[in-house]
Image (cartoon, grey):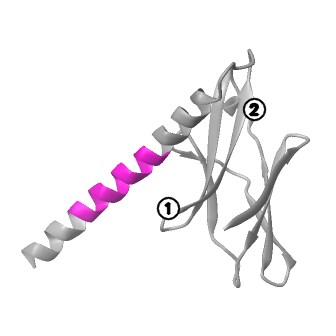
Amino acid sequence: MLETSRIRAGRWEGLVASAVEPKLEVVHLEQVLPGLEVSAQNPGKWRLSLPIPVETLSDGVQTFLLRSVPSAEVLGRFTIVTGVPLEDDIRAEVDLLRAELDLLKKAFRRHCVETEAKAEA
């Protein structure tokens, strides 16, 4: 589970608790971002660092998801708001809901395929 998160000098940084080195990815608009570094911080703590690609930044709300590989379980998220300041944070919430809905749709489709395969066996 993601314990802390911040953005500093164009890099997202986080801290995850895990007994073993976690296999993680950061996803933006269904694309896995390159460059995620995972290093031991303390026993059971792992420091995460990711340069935020310039091409992911544009006006509006951009939501990034930290996921476990291969389960695709979302461990945390961070949001960047750029451009005209938003009066309400509802756009960030809608963007987050869309990202989570996409994950649920993928998991449901995978479940249906696995269930059909078991039924045919």
The picture places residue 34, in percent across and down from the top left corner, at: 68, 50
Where residue 87 sits, quadrant-wise, is top right
Q: Main secondary structure of the magenta part?
A: helix
The picture places residue 105, in percent across and down from the top left corner, at: 34, 49
Q: Which element type, helix, strand or loop, lies under badge 1?
A: loop
- Horizontal relation, residue 36 to residue 29: left or right: right
Q: Amino acid at mark 2?
A: Val
Residue 103 sits inside the magenta stretch? yes
Depicted 103 relative to depicted 60: above or below = below
Please count the marks in the image.
2
**Which of pointers 1 and 2 indicates the residue nearer the eye?**
1
Q: Which residue reaches farthest top?
A: 84
Chain part drawn in magenta = 100-112
Q: Residue at x 80, y 76 (%)?
A: 45
Check disc 1 and report the residue beneath it. Answer: 72
Q: CA distance from mark 1 to mark 2?
A: 24 Å
Q: Which residue reaches farthest front?
A: 88
Q: Residues within 10 Å of mark 2 (few under 14, many from 20)?
A: few
Residue 32 sits inside the magenta stretch? no
Check disc 2 and report the residue beneath it. Answer: 54
Q: Residues within 10 Å of mark 1 (few under 14, many from 20)?
A: some
- Horizontal relation, residue 84 to residue 109: left or right: right
User: As rendered, which of 32 and 90 lies closer to the eye?
Assistant: 90
Q: Residue at x 73, y 57 (%)?
A: 36
Q: Residue at x 27, y 64 (%)?
A: 111
Depicted 92 relative to depicted 116: above or below = above
Where residue 112 sits, quadrant-wise, is bottom left
Q: Which element type, helix, strand or loop, lies under badge 2?
A: helix
- Quarter of the image where the N terminus is located: bottom right
Any mark on residue 21, and which? none
- Horizontal relation, residue 115 to residue 89: left or right: left
Q: Amino acid at mark 1?
A: Ala
